[in-house]
């Protein structure tokens, strides 16, 4: 049997592939890596989201590490992914384990390894986990092993497992990045959808501690996430959008925010009830930081699938830009070698200057509250002013489920005979670092990416008009 660590760890369906037996072998593979790299001496932070069996899997991880001589710092409850990342760096730990499947459906679980710098592990690390797991699995099939580890309670008693509460230190860190005075004095009201996830008592507490009037939705644990994927995309938060629109229409100064299940992603809805795409929010935050966060210096980083509005701002304002493959670990890689004002991706992930090299949805929500509080106007108005200065950018992302045969045929076609023209515009550049991205002479672009875990193809596109965007989408569909 083989397992695959994707851009955000190993995810699988509970009781199908994600079992106690397989997890034990994954944990032992990670133990082997930690010992080889001499990272176990620093201890490992262990956290989880609100998913089914999260606490039990966390205990198994702590027990496995501790029984192998590696101290485990286990969070006392479910916590946001960025909290684990920050706690790793704060404690100078050897790394961290997070039981999360992020925004996947409720029947999934996952385990994600973060390195000592708090960043998601890069492929050179996770490939070792996969190889070690395969060796252990093969050996287990030939000669099943009975593991007589000390009990969780005994390991806790002797100090090899320590229960920690990272809330206070993390929220204190956010106060260094967010202008609390601007928010506290603004009179801005907030509607917050926790989406039954880990950010309850984090995002909302930060604001209520400032005296902000916060209406909180879905702020208890539900392993089914209310029957929806815990993803803060427009189709999954209709009640939040409707509530903000209702309160805004009555004349209230209000913003809506949301976090996904493990709080590494975010959403923002302004007082008009407008849901802003991550591409738009990243541009707003980048421009705002240039004007109101003078201490944030350095480059800006976006993924290949993210809007070139970031490029337009960077070019005009003289900021160095990097574009990297999809996956926040690649943004983190840049962030660890040089200062970065902002790094973000179109799938609602971002981090900022000298913060953690990991997506932080809690911080993101608070920054969009700050922007609204300072400007006193809806985020959609801010976006309109950006379009007037830097030009209009229309974006699209669509997923298509294909048979394995059709998926392979499309992949082969794009590799062997990449289109030289898209709907009348000449292709002037082809980028194959992550799928196939075709950039046209009018600066519109079309990206085709293939899922590594399921027969799905993803189309991304951007153009200077809705008409041109529709032409690109029609071209994409013609390839299927």
Image (cartoon, helix red, strand yellow):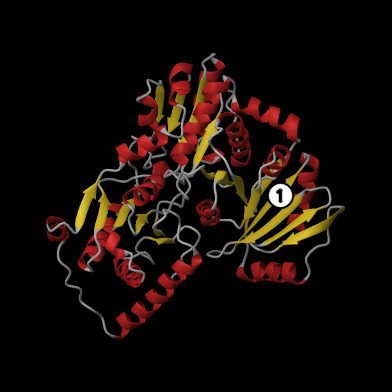
x, y percent for residue 405: 64, 71
How many numbered circles are shown? Answer: 1
354 w.r.t. 388: above or below? below
239 or 335: nearer the eye? 335
The one nearer the camera, 476 or 192, is: 192
Q: Nearer the viewer, residue 150 or 115?
A: 115
Location of the C terminus (image quadrant)? bottom right
> Residue tagged by mark 1?
461
In percent of width and height, residue 134 lies at 40, 77
How packed mark 1 is, by other alpha carbons closer than 10 Å (few <14, some 14-19, many 20 or more), is many
Res 427 quadrant in image: bottom right
Residue 59 visible within the image: no
Residue visible at 54% across and 19% down? 248
Label 1: which secondary element? strand
As drawn, the residue found furthest toward the top would be 251
- Depth check, front residue: 199 or 290: 290
Q: How far from the left and from the top, in percent, is residue 264?
A: 45, 45
The vertical placement of 72 against 123, above or below, is: above
> Quadrant of the rendered structure where residue 16 is?
bottom left
Q: Residue at x 53, y 54 (%)?
A: 337
Q: In the current view of this chain or complex, which residue is farthest to the right?
A: 424
Q: Position of residue 265 (x, y in %)?
A: 48, 43
Visible in this render: residue 447? yes
Which residue is at a point 31% across and 54% down the rendered structure image? 45
């Amino acid at each position: 049997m083989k397992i695959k660590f994707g851009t955000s760890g190993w995810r699988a369906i509970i009781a199908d592939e994600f079992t106690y037996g397989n997890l034990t072998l994954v944990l032992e593979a990670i133990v082997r890596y930690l010992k080889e790299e001499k990272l176990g001496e620093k201890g490992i932070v262990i956290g989880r989201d609100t998913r089914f069996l999260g606490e039990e899997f966390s205990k198994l991880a702590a027990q496995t590490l501790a029984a192998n001589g590696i101290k485990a710092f286990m969070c006392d409850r479910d916590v946001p992914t960025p909290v684990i990342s920050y706690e790793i760096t704060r404690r100078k730990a050897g790394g961290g384990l997070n039981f999360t499947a992020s925004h996947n459906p409720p029947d999934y679980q996952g385990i994600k390894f973060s390195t000592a710098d708090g960043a998601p592990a890069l492929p050179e690390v996770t490939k070792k986990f996969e190889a070690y797991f395969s060796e252990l699995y093969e050996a287990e099939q030939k000669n099943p092993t009975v593991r007589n580890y000390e009990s969780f309670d005994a390991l806790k008693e002797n100090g090899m497992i320590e229960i920690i509460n990272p809330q206070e230190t993390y929220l204190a860190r956010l106060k260094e990045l967010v202008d609390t005075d601007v928010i506290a004095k603004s009179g801005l009201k907030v509607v917050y959808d926790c989406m039954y996830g880990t950010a309850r008592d984090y995002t909302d507490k930060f604001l209520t501690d400032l005296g902000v009037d916060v209406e909180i939705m879905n702020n208890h644990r539900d392993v089914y996430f209310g029957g929806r994927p815990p993803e803060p995309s427009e189709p999954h938060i209709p009640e939040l959008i409707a509530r903000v629109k209702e309160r805004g229409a009555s004349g209230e100064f209000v913003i809506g925010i949301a976090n996904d299940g493990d709080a590494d992603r975010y959403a923002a809805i302004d007082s008009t009830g407008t849901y802003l795409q991550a591409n738009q929010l990243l541009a707003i935050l980048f421009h705002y930081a240039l004007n109101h966060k003078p201490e944030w210096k350095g480059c800006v980083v976006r993924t290949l699938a993210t809007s070139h509005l970031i490029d337009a701002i960077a070019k005009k304002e003289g900021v160095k830009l990097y574009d990297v493959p999809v996956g926040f670990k690649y943004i983190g890689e840049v962030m660890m070698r040089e200062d970065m004002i902002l790094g973000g991706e179109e799938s609602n992930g971002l981090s900022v200057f000298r913060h953690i090299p990991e997506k932080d949805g809690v911080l993101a929500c608070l920054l969009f509250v700050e922007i609204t509080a300072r400007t006193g106007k809806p985020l959609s108005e801010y976006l309109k002013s950006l379009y007037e200065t830097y030009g209009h950018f229309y974006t699209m992302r669509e997923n298509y489920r294909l048979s394995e045969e059709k998926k392979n045929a499309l992949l082969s076609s794009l590799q062997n005979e990449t289109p030289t023209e898209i709907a009348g515009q000449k292709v002037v550049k082809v980028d194959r670092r992550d799928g196939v991205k075709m950039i046209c002479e009018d600066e519109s672009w079309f990206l085709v990416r293939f899922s590594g875990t399921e027969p799905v193809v993803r189309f991304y596109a951007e153009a200077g008009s809705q008409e041109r965007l529709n032409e690109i989408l029609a071209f994409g569909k013609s390839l299927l």
